[in-house]
Structure formats: C-alpha cells, structure tokens
Amino acid sequence: MSDGNLSDKKNIIMKRILLLSIITMMTCYSAAQKRDTVRLRVNYMAEFKRYVEDKKLRTDEMVLDIGHQQSRFYSRWHDFRWHITDSLIARGASFAEVQGAISDYPRGRVFDNIYKHYPQKDRLTLTTFLLKHFYYEEALEKPVWTLIPQDTVILGYRCGYAEGTFRGRKWRACYTEEIPVSEGPWKLGGLPGLILYAAESSGGFSYRCIGLTQVRGAVMPVPKLKKHVRCSRRQLMGMIKEHDKDPRAFERKLGLPGIAFDASGKPLKHPPRTPAFMED
C-alpha cells in the first residue's frame, strides 16, 4: 500500500472521529450542564485593518471554541498573555517580572472576546479592553446568505461557497457540511456547516482556518463582568472613535493621567486616526 493511500485513510478516519464528536455535541445540547465544555477548537489566521489609514493589513491568530451550547471567539496570544499576567499578579509578581514572562510570546492585536449564546440562547456578549474593561450584550444576528454553486477543499474538507451581507459589509465564505455546526469566526455563522474561510469584499478583513482540534474536558470560560463597564455596541464604537482621534484626551476623560513620554522625555503625540469597523 502506498504512503498516499495510508495518508488518505488517516484523513478519512480523523474526519469520521471529528464528525462523531460533533454529532455527540449536538445530541447533548439540551442536556448540557450549566458550565459548558469545549468540544472543538478552530484556529484562524485573521488579516484586518485597524485604521482606515493603514497601508498594510495586520494579523492575529484567532481561536473559536465550540461547546455544547455556547462558543467563544478570541485572540490566542492576547488570551495567553493575559492569563500569564493574571496568574503572576495573583502571586505578587512585580511589573518587571510580568513583562519578562510574557515578552517571549507574540503580542495579540485583538482585544475582543465574543461569546455566542451567552448569557442565554440567541444572545451575544462582547468584552473588550479600551484602557478599561467594557462589555455589551445584543441579539445574536446572522448574515443573510446566498449559497453559490461552487466548491473547493480546505484542510482536506470539501467546502461550498456562500455570499452574504452583515451590517453594511459583504462577505464571501467557504463552509463545510462535513462539520455540521452552524458556526464561524467573529459574528459570522448561519450556514449549513462550519465556516473555514471568510473574506470581506473590500479586502480589509478575512479569516482563514489553519487548524481544527478535538478538545476534551476543557470548561468553556464565561466572562467575568463585575469589573467591566456595561455599554451598548454604538457607545463602544463611539468611544473607539474618541480614543483613535485623541488618545490622551480619551485617557483624561476616563480619569487616567492622559500623558505619555517617549525615550527622550518628550510628550508623545499621536496623529488622529479613523477606526476601521467591521460593522455599521
């Protein structure tokens, strides 16, 4: 038997195991405990504009954890560094010790955590950090999709195409019915299978799946909102605009010092910038 045939058989076996796991996950949906558990972890490479003025796209590795009832979407490295920081601070570590511990790891560029079906079914909670911790809750909306008669293969999974609109932007996505979960990166979802690729029509935002992993026994985190300031999505977008226009003025508005210095001791100046939002 050739190495190619062995590889094909291994891929088929892995797909069957993953499919069985997903079916079990769907069957257990209504019987799940109060604290959900992660069953499938999907890693994406995100490319995006942070500011309208950006000449190059930024990148971050994003993770979609899918459980029986809920899902969570977050930056792998921001989450990792945050956990290290919290752990060390709890042990009384100094600022220098914390910085030394996290300096070897990539810096996450996305601060948002998106929890779907939290605090209840068909609701979405987003937490973020903008000098302070903020969060909002909203209805879980889905893009309006049109299925396209085309197909492709991503990571060995046969995928169909779809085009859709969501809050002012047009998206093109590839989804696989071999993983029958109506999930996807960011706020995308609502297709007959897991979204493995999605790109916004202007070229400013995209997600490409780079790996899938079965997970056993990991508890799905829920946001700790006691130290967060509640706001609406519109209010958060307004604060981001204020911050990007004049960071120092925004800091003073939040009761922070509102001044920073460069290596030579001169006050830092930031040119006003325009945030590139993924939704209206």
Image (cartoon, rainbow, N blue to C red):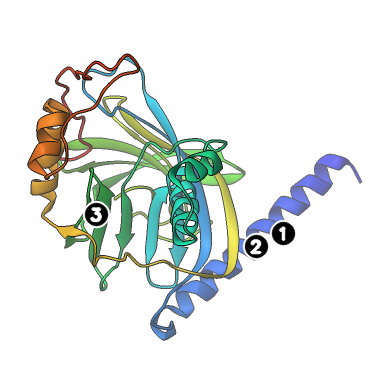
Residue labelled with disc 2: 16
Decide: few, some or many residues near mark 3? Use Cα within 10 Å; few <14, some 14-19, many ≥20. Answer: some
> Which residue position is annotated with label 1?
13
Q: Residue at x 19, y 18 (%)?
A: 269
Instruction: Please say if the residues under marks 3 and 1 sit with CB atoms less than 8 Å apart.
Output: no
Left or right for 11, reference 187: right
Q: Earlier in the sequence, mark 3 or mark 1?
A: 1
Q: Quadrant of residue 121?
A: bottom left
Q: Residue 279: image x %, image y %?
A: 18, 40
- Sort mark 1 into few (<14), some (14-19) or many (20+) by Cα contacts within 10 Å: few
Q: Secondary structure at mark 3?
A: loop
- Residue 32 at x, y = what percent? 43, 82
User: Which residue is under mark 3?
Assistant: 142
User: Residue flagged by tag 1: what amino acid is it?
Assistant: Ile
Label whose residue precedes the other's in the sequence (2 or 3): 2
Residue 130 location, quadrant: top left
In-front residue for pair 27/233: 233
Left or right: where does residue 166 sit relative to residue 192? left
Residue 215 vs 35, above or below: the answer is above
Identify which amino acid the numbered label 2 is placed on: Arg
Q: Is residue 201 visible?
A: yes
- Indicate the secondary structure of the residue bearing disc 2: helix
The residue shown at (30%, 19%) is: 262
Label 3 amino acid?
Lys
Marks 2 and 1: CB-CB under 8 Å? yes
Query: Looking at the picture, how far across and down is residue 36, in whole percent?
Result: 43, 74
Q: At numbered mark 1, what does the secondary structure look like: helix, strand or loop?
A: helix
Which one is nearer the viewer's eye here, 228 or 219? 228
When the figure is inspected, residue 245 is found, relative to residue 265, above or below; the finding is below
